[in-house]
Image: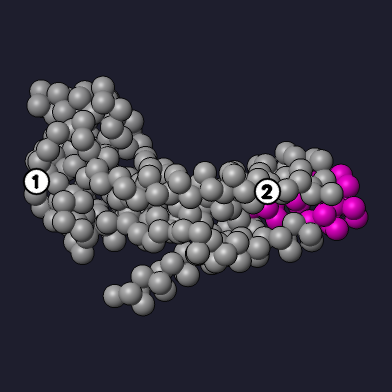
Amino acid sequence: MAAKLNPAAVWGLLRELRAVMEDDKPLLVTGALAGSLEKELGRGGSPNAVSSRGRIEDAAVLVRVLAGKPSDEDEAALRAANRARVPVLAVQTAAESFDVPYVLATDVIACRPGRGFPVEEIARAIAARMGETATSLAARLPVLRDPVCDALIDSFSRKNGILGAAIFIPGADFPVLTLNQVRLVLRLASAYGIEIDQQRLPEIVGTVAAGFGLRAVARQVLGAIPVAGWALKGGIAYAGTRAIGEGARRYFATQVEAST
């Protein structure tokens, strides 16, 4: 018999979603040509969601624009972000590459000469660097929405794929996988600025229910392929979670379009 999903865990996720929706920390862009990048990242977004002024400690993420070798001022800003545990990315506008202190090499975005800022690449780097915490910014900045949703769906699908393969007791994976799927749907909702309450919760249940059939198929196939069953089970958990995420994403996008 499959284990049951604890309703208290779902209500906990709803409370977490409300807290996320209340987070109004901005994306802070500083350094050389910061004003130009601020405009591009903020296009179509909410007022004050992106700023080139303000305290680093109050930012959701810092994007520091460099014009070559990091100056003392650059290093001071990056050090302050590191101390405040604010996620940070660097955008290098010079053709030559330089080591950037306090920033991982994978978080340094290079600008190609004469092509302007690679806004989409920067947005995807922000989404990857911030993870789930990027949903509040995505709700206020359309440029981040697709990258953040992509990152969320990829992350939760991988997690459930690993869990689906690792949990061998029949039915024991149900509450873990389902709770992750609910969490994914709620995070996608927050990325679109949609709040889910008790009245709308049945919509979430209906979306997540799409994965139940996939798990039933997995249990049936496991009996026929006992040796490789764990790999197949993990693949179905991965595919089911991705399908739920993409379905929820389309649903929330339609809701936003209908309200505008």
Q: Which residue occupies the extreme right position in the image?
A: 224
Can residue 145 be seen from the camera position used here? no
Judge left or right: residue 71 versus residue 216. Answer: left
Residue at 10 percent of width and 52 percent of height: 36
Q: What's the coloring here?
A: one colour
Q: Quadrant of residue 230?
A: top right
Task: Assign a secondary structure to mark 2.
Answer: loop
**Disc nearer the start of the sequence (1/2):** 2
Mark 1 against mark 2, which lies toward the viewer?
Answer: 2
Q: Residues within 10 Å of mark 2 (few under 14, many from 20)?
A: some
Q: Which residue occupies the extreme front position in the image?
A: 199
**Vertical relation: 251 (above or below) 154:** below
- Is the stretch drawn in magenta largely helix, strand or loop? helix
* Mark-to-mark CA distance, 1 and 2: 50 Å
Residue 165: x and y in percent read 73, 43
Residue 93: x and y in percent read 16, 43
Residue at 41 percent of width and 43 percent of height: 131
Q: Is residue 237 magenta?
A: yes
Residue at numbered disc 1: 33
Q: Residues within 10 Å of mark 1 (few under 14, many from 20)?
A: some
Task: Specify the quadrant that holds the C terminus.
Answer: bottom left
Residue at 90 percent of width and 55 percent of height: 224
**Vertical relation: 154 (above or below) 202:** above
- In this picture, which residue range is highlighted in magenta? 218-238
Q: Amino acid at mark 2?
A: Leu
Residue 188: x and y in percent read 45, 57
Can residue 9 be seen from the camera position used here? yes
Label at residue 5:
2
Task: Assign a secondary structure to mark 1.
Answer: loop
Q: Amino acid at mark 1?
A: Leu
Residues at discs 1 and 2 in contact (Cβ within 8 Å):
no
